[in-house]
Image (spheres, rainbow, N blue to C red):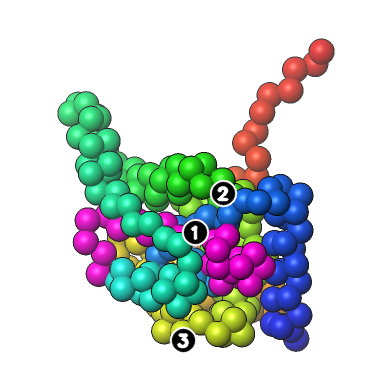
């Protein structure tokens, strides 16, 4: 029942309204990985604001094997873009941590996306920008984002759309199919999203929208991940004194 054209048009109008209220002359700035989410978010911003008001930031960590897809996207859209290699920044921070503190695997994996978001904000504040969050509902539902990394931004056009829905919109926007259908890899440990998650986005998306899933073990896994990661979607708890 998903009307991709209707939702796409509504999202474009929503982006226009956001900028009318939060920076009439500002640019939309976002990290460009070459995956479907950043590609579709960028294309939505171009349709809403025009290509001259969208800025992409490419951020390889050393050598990125699929950076050609990121360049395919920025060239397809004709948007201004900058490449900032974050390898030295990541290495410098890791090397600055005292030797007696053993950096955990999770910390090592989450450091690059947090440095990438710092980079996007540095570019954004230098070009009169507003940072576009590129997360989608499916990933957010099971916590598949890095807190204070790719999970943040100034506006979020796709956080209430599932992967299936986002891809339908991507095709409507005329993006190259190889970008829209590119197999998502988390960029942290080199595995595909679905290998890490233990279920497919197709299964997850149906469950989110209908509550239906045949595999009881996968239902339990999705529910557990959703519950564990709700904190990523909520404001930071703050103490409220009785004054």
Mark pair 3, 1: CA separation:
22 Å
Q: Which residue is mark 3?
A: 177
Q: Is residue 64 magenta?
A: yes
The reply, left or right, for residue 217 in relation to residue 113 is right
The reply, left or right, for residue 78 in relation to residue 59 is right
Q: Which residue is mark 1?
A: 55
Q: Which residue is mark 2?
A: 129
Badge 1: few (under 14), some or many (20 or more) residues near its Cα, within 10 Å?
Answer: many
Residue 236 at what x, y percent from top left?
A: 62, 36
Q: Is residue 84 magenta?
A: no
The quarter holding residue 213 reads bottom right
Q: Residue at left 48%, top 43%? A: 126
The reply, left or right, for residue 157 in relation to residue 195 is right
Q: Residue at left 69%, top 76%? A: 8
140 is higher (above) or lower (below) than 48: above
Furthest toward the right, the residue is: 243
Residue 144 at what x, y percent from top left?
A: 49, 59
Mark pair 1, 2: CA separation:
8 Å
Dot 3 falls on a residue whose secondary structure is helix
The quarter holding residue 13 reads bottom right
| Of the two numbered discs 2 and 3 in the rendering, the one whose residue sits closer to the viewer | 2
Disc on the earlier residue, 2 or 3: 2
**Is there CB contact under 8 Å for labels 1 and 2?**
yes
């Amino acid at each position: 029942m998903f009307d991709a054209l209707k939702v796409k048009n509504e999202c474009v109008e929503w982006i226009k309204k956001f900028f009318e209220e939060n920076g009439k002359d500002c640019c939309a700035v976002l990290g460009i990985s070459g995956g479907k989410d950043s590609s579709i978010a960028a294309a939505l911003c171009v349709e809403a604001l025009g290509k001259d008001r969208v800025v992409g930031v490419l951020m390889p960590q050393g050598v990125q094997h699929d950076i050609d897809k990121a360049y395919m996207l920025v060239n397809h859209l004709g948007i201004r873009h900058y490449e900032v290699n974050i390898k030295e920044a990541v290495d410098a921070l890791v090397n600055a941590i005292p030797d007696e503190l053993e950096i955990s695997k999770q910390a090592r994996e989450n450091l690059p996306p947090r440095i990438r978001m710092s980079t996007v904000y540095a570019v954004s504040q230098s070009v009169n920008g507003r940072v576009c969050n590129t997360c989608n509902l499916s990933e957010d539902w099971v916590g598949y984002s890095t807190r204070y990394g790719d999970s943040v931004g100034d506006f979020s056009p796709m956080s209430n759309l599932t992967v299936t829905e986002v891809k339908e919109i991507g095709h409507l926007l005329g993006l190259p199919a190889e970008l829209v259908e590119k197999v998502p890899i988390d960029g942290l440990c080199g595995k595909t999203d679905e290998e890490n998650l233990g279920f497919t986005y197709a299964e997850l998306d149906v469950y989110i929208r209908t509550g239906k899933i045949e595999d009881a073990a996968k239902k339990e896994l999705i529910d557990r991940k959703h519950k564990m990661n709700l904190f990523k979607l909520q404001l930071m708890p703050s103490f409220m004194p009785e004054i």
